[in-house]
Image (spheres, grey):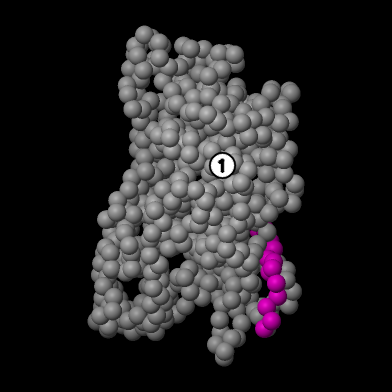
Amino acid sequence: MSFVLVLCSLLLWACNIISPENDPITYGESYIPNLLSTDKAAYKPGEVVKFSLNSMPEQAVQVRYTHLGEVLSQSAVSAQSWTWQPPTEDFQGYMAELHATIGGKDSVIASVGIDVSSEPSRFPRNGFLSSYGSMSQKEINAILGDLNRYHINYVQFQDWHWKHHHPLAGSATQPMDVWTDIISRNCYRSTVQAYIDGAHERGMLTLFYNLGYGCLEDFATDDVSREWLMYTDRLHQNIDNHPLGSPFKSAIYLANMHDQGWRDYLRQRNDEVYSTFNFDGWQIDQLGARPTAVYDYEGRNIDVQAAFGSFIANEKAAQPSKRIVMNAVGQYGQQEQIATAPVDFLYTEVWEHSNTNGYSVFSNIITDNARWSGGKQTVLAAYLNYDLGLKGRGYFNTPGIIMATAAASAWGGTILQMGEHMLCHEYFPDDNLSMTGQLKRAMIRYYDFAVAYENLLRPDAPAGGVNTDWFGVDVTGKDGACTFNQWGPVKDQIATVGRHVGSRDVIHLLSYRNATHLDWCDSDGDQAAQSMLTNIPVSLEVGSKPARVWVATPDWQQGAAIEPEWSYESGTLNITVPALQYWTMIVVEK
């Protein structure tokens, strides 16, 4: 989270959040029939997967276990819970498909993705928590259960801390049981710890959030020296700060991340955090480029971003077992500093918008990050339906959320979206917008899809290099109903992009046929739904006759792989694509 709003907007949503009449509420139908779940968000090689169904289907069902469209095994389902032992190969995605005969046809009625990975940073899926009041274990389990169903394997604890410069309330020897956060909400140590324990039980890593250079106005009482801070003048009279009004406790005053005194001080405060809570690491925040020049106590000009790389390296050296992620606000400091530092993955807070080709913002960030870092994965902090959320209580616009999620996923990234609520704002506790039942079902399918096909969507980088095997795809629609174009998106058309993954070519079809606009944010929530197309005859050029062709989409048949009708003649592959609504993936095996 970065505090980049003008103050009037900040106060608007801050007041909404703390008003009793705006307590969290659930809009729309939330019950999902035949919901298939697993006991963990991810599994180590050799671990057994435990499945559960929220209700037994009326008809006879079987479960089949697949990997990249290939059926590994299948068996009958006779109870609401059972187990499966996946293959022991590391870094693999699988899908469990519950299928039954309906109307004389075999139909997939439920599915779930399974990630088998010894290292979460290989396929990071970032989620969040943002409220730590007095909570029962049942309430905590319900929220973690939702994150688990989305396969979240990193949970960042937003706004959990006491003060930016003194995150642990009290001391390591006498931590407080209850403290107030920056907006004076009560936070309970028992709730924070229960969340950490519950996340670990579900195979998730936990990251505590904090600025890398923030202080509240009482910093001097906690032994923070003015010599460690940044100033907007050369005579150290005016401390650089981010102003916040009521109901926030204080403005945020900014320290100099180059200063060794500040580094040593904050490292000691972090050691206190780790000695009290078994967090797995730190999600470091920043505020992006400063609006004016800044100076150290001696009046020397400061290049803020130039400190990021060494700051991260020093923190990692002090706590080698702890994970580090750092926010790059609008990519500030990413290329030269963060991307080459010892972070688990690259985290970009996205502020660039375009109504004409905005989804390309995602593809540009994801491919830049991979190139700059030598192949690390990207998580996008992209706040969807932003302006809609500022207007007060309401619903997320389902088409806008799906189209942004599809674009990010097809290009190998993921969006930070899921917490106690879906995220619409950089102040994470803001829960003005709620998910309808339709959106909840869609997001479960999209997260399952991203996990099941992670080896195609987020492939390994070659030794010593980066997977840059993207290629343009010329797709022709034979019946004239669809117009295709190579990425980026064009209104009224279907965008295409391909990627070579080992012996497979993966071709993505992303529909913008009914798009109201092409801005990933869908800020006003007015993006239009994409119509479902079925049995679309398409052609594309391939080098030789494929060994196998299959397609999959999160919008149909619960994401299961389907073998379509296809033929090959003189370098042209003709396929009848069974379904395309928002995103369909064609896989050509050589």
Q: Residue at x 52, y 51 (%)?
A: 393
Amino acid residing under circle 1: Ile
- Is residue 500 placed above or below 181 in the rendered structure? below
- Is residue 535 placed above or below 239 in the rendered structure? below
Q: Which residue is mark 1?
A: 17
Q: Secondary structure at mark 1?
A: helix
Relative image position of residue 194 (x, y in whole percent)? 71, 43
Q: Is residue 213 left or right of residue 278?
A: left
Relative image position of residue 319 (x, y in whole percent)? 58, 30
Q: Residue at x 50, y 70 (%)?
A: 559
| Tally of numbered discs | 1
Of the pair 17 and 131, the residue shown nearer to us = 17
Of the pair 355 and 256, the residue shown nearer to us = 355
Q: Residue at x 75, y 48 (%)?
A: 137
Residue closest to the far front: 21
Relative image position of residue 344 (x, y in whole percent)? 50, 42
Crowd tier of the residue under label 1, counting other residues whose Cα lies within 10 Å: few below 14, some 14–19, many 20 or above: some
Q: Is residue 233 left or right of residue 226?
A: left
Span shown in magenta: 44-59
Q: Residue at x 62, y 68 (%)?
A: 32
The answer to whether residue 553 shows anywhere in this view is yes
Q: Quadrant of residue 520?
A: bottom left
